[in-house]
Image (spheres, rainbow, N blue to C red):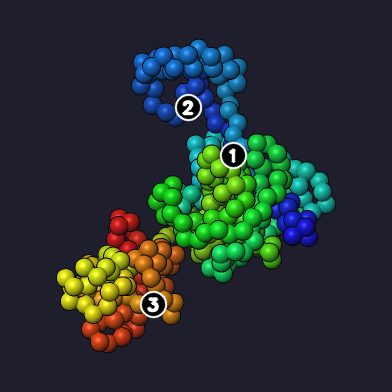
Amino acid sequence: MRAIVRQRQNAVVRVEIFEAYLPGLIRRGTRLANPFPLTSNVGDAFSFALYLPSAVFYGMRKHLGSGVLFDPEGYLLTNHHVIKNADRIAVRLTDAKGVRHLLDARLVGTDRHVDVALLKIDPKGIPLVTAPLGDSEQVALGDWGIAVGNPYRLTGTVTCGVVSGIHRQVRQNLIEDFIQVDAAVNPGNSGGPVLNTKGEIVGLVDLGMIPANNIGFAIPTGLIAPFLDDMKKHGRPRRGYLGVGVRDLTPEMAKDWGLKAETGVLVAEVSASSPAGRAGIRKGDLIEAIGGKKVATARDVQMAALRTPPGAELPLTVRRGDKSLTLKPTLALRCAPFRIF
């Protein structure tokens, strides 16, 4: 692990966010319905009195987070919540020669549903250190994970632990498929990478579990990498739409639907004009596999659709009565609500 850290540590950068405020801690661009926040409670009045001098003399407030360079052209990843409301973004990094730099960064694209942001710096001939994106689908329980970030302004902090959970949902983001790592994660780690033992980025630190500080949750690269080109071209990801409503099959549901199986993923609704409907998927079908990989829950189907860009095929193996069918819908551009996949 020492060699991996030595090789990749300088790929991790400190992201500095500046927010512009008017006196009274009111963000520029915010509608000034009440410039004096004294109407809610006594705490607001106290805060206003305490912070007004600093707001007058210091019109910019600075927040810190982490990020990771993955492209020699200067592209880096961080969290959406790190750069949210930023009026200016700067990046501090150390190049391959050990020289420190402070560079301005611009926001290229963001995915607020996954909590990912893509930034770009101008290297100006600086020899950048980068870390390649790995395949998060290969991450398994018990694997080692190395988290690198800048907690509490402690630049380049390295912690490690085993992968203690995969496909976690903690209701932090709209689209979740977290990798859980037993590594210390604290404020300032957000946006930093989780590396595997090959030195590849397999996750992006998103949050920790408070009050415990040795449980961290990382966004898998499988939710990021397929949509980087979209974020570069369009500023946001273009996700696929299959057009089915799916549910986990229970014995009670199997009895109601007249199905022999007692477990699986049931197609509860399907639109005839959707990609699924045009491919021949019917209400009452049981989805057994996607792309040759078995699925156990409705969440598996949902995440497979969300990971697939529009225009790509998503091969499905479904059971209809006693027959097993392989259908190949071509996903459309998602415009539907996230309850329909």
Amino acid type assigned to the residue bearing label 1 in the image: Pro
Mark 1 and mark 2: span between their CA atoms? Answer: 23 Å
Residue 230 in view (yes/no): no
Q: Nearer the viewer, mark 3 or mark 2?
A: 3
| Mark 1 neighbour density, 10 Å: few (under 14) some (14–19) many (20 or more) | some
Q: Secondary structure at mark 2?
A: strand
Q: How many numbered callouts? A: 3
| In this rendering, the label closer to the viewer, 1 or 2 | 1
Residue shown at the point (49%, 22%) measured from the top left: 25
Residue drawn where x is 24% and y is 70% of the image? 251
Q: Are marks 3 and 1 in contact (CB under 8 Å)?
A: no
Query: Pointer 1: what residue?
Result: 187
Name the residue located 58 percent from the left edge and 28 percent from the top edge. Answer: 61
Residue 36: image location, x then y, percent: 42, 15
Q: Is residue 199 left or right of residue 330?
A: right
Q: Seen in the image, is 195 located left or right of residue 112?
A: right
User: Disc 3 or 2, which lies upstream in sequence?
Assistant: 2
Task: Using the image as rendered, state which of residue 124 and residue 44 is in the foreground.
Answer: 44
Q: SS at mark 1?
A: loop
Q: Earlier in the sequence, mark 1 or mark 2?
A: 2
Residue at point 58% right, 59% down? Answer: 163
- Label 3 to label 2, Cα distance in Å? 49 Å
Above/below status of 68 relative to 46: below
In the rendered structure, the answer to whether residue 93 lies left or right of residue 337 reads right
Q: Is residue 259 above or below residue 122?
A: below
Pointer 2: what residue?
27
Hey, what amino acid is under mark 2?
A: Arg
Q: Which mark is residue 289?
A: 3
Q: Position of residue 149 (x, y in %)?
A: 66, 46
Foreground residue among 308 and 310: 308
